[in-house]
Image (cartoon, grey):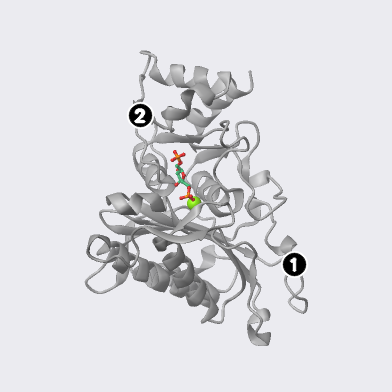
Amino acid sequence: MYTLGEFIIKNKDCFSYSTESLLRLFSCIKLASKEIHKEVNKAGLTKKIIGVSGVKNIQGEVQKKVDDFANQAFINSFKSRNVVCGIASEESKNFIEIKNKKIMNNPYIVLIDPLDGSSNIDVNVSIGTIFSVYMRSSSTKDHLSINDFLQVGNRQILAGYIIYGSSTILVYSVGNGVHGFTLDPSIGTFYLSHPNLFFPKNGNIYSVNEGNYTRFSNGIKRFLRYCQEEKENRPYTARYIGSLVGDFHRNLIKGGIYMYPKTVFFPEGKLRLLYECNPIAFLTEQAGGKASDGKRRILDILPKNLHQRTPFFCGPKEMVEKLEEFTNE
Ligand code: AHM
Ligand code: MG
């Protein structure tokens, strides 16, 4: 059984950039995720990460203590290792430039949703971290600019997530398939457990917050009726946790489509293009699937601002293409 580090070294030719940098990036990600794993697993016993922090984040949402804890864990971990020159987080208004001459020479920037689906922590349901890495677009001689972060998703060089569920699993891709590693908490090591993840054929799950049904467009409503029809391998089964990482992870393994369309409350969609949709879209495509805003490929959207939202649909190609037939009618 390979550890994550051994797997990276064995597959070093799959990453076009420096293997040492990739190992260092993962050293940051592993450390912060193990800190979160440790806190999440004793969440019922401590008030440290349960409940609200009293602060609102950039989206105007009340920040949970766990959001703040996870944000700090990742920022500290990335700041203290000489590997990224900038960080943008769903929980922070502006990007952070690491102003250390030596570090500014590093070409990598990271975008992160430190704790997605955090409202689930109070009820012991799976939550996750989502991350993606790009090369900065400006010269290492200059200060970072917003354009270093506003890149199209198809320029990601690394994307992944960590799910804190019945076990803690790290799933990533550098553009050469999708691989999952399960944490053995007794020794703090991630071992390869899910090599070459690929959406299975004949997926039959649909995941959407159906409480928003009356606010969906007619195209989405018709697609949902299609999912519920008794024909071929339908009706599909409905599964929705309300935790993107948890819903996506299940759909990737079992075969299903995830949907977060526009609603009256979220006229642009709820999920954030940079922190949530782009990395999940990258993994989706690497696993043989498709990710779309209903009309366009997610990975082709040029972001206009750091916290931009978008409608989001991802899953096995044939399911997303079927949905697009309805949304494009
Ligand atoms: P968050 O980033 O504030 O945690 O919100 C994102 C989460 C996703 O994990 C999940 O898929 C979605 O919001 C659920 O939204 P809803 O409760 O509206 O169904
Ligand atoms: Mg989120």
Sort mark 2 into few (<14), some (14-19) or many (20+) by Cα contacts within 10 Å: some
Quadrant of res 194 = bottom left
Q: What residue is pinned by disc 2? A: 238
Is residue 107 visible to us here? yes
In the rendered image, the vertical position of residue 93 relative to residue 299, given as above or below? below
The answer as to whether callout 1 falls within 8 Å of ligand 2 is no
The circle drawn on residue 145 is 1
* Numbered disc total: 2
What is the three-letter code of the residue carrying label 2? Ala
Choose between 159 and 48: the one closer to the eye.
Answer: 48
In the picture provided, is 9 more to the left or to the right than 166? right
Circles 2 and 1, Cβ within 8 Å, touching? The answer is no
Q: Quadrant of the C terminus?
A: top right
Q: Which image quarter holds the N terminus?
A: bottom left
Q: Which of 185 and 48 is in front in this view?
A: 48
The numbered mark at residue 175 is none
Residue 234 locus on image (x, y percent): 36, 19
Residue 316, horizontal then vertical, whole percent = 47, 35
Identify the residue at horizontal 63%, vertical 82% (top origin): 103
Callout 1: SS: loop
Report which quarter residue 138 is drawn in. Answer: bottom right
For the residue carrying disc 1, how many other residues have a C-alpha within 10 Å: few (<14), some (14-19), or many (20+)? some
Q: Position of residue 85 (x, y in %)?
A: 63, 75
Give the quadrant of residue 43: bottom left
190 and 264: which one is in front?
Answer: 264
Q: At label 1, which amino acid type do we have?
A: Ser
Which residue is more in the foreground, 106 or 228? 228
* Position in image of residue 115 (x %, y %): 44, 58
How far is disc 2 from disc 1 in space, using C-alphas? 43 Å
Q: Earlier in the sequence, mark 2 or mark 1?
A: 1
Q: Which residue is drawn at 48% across and 66% down?
A: 71
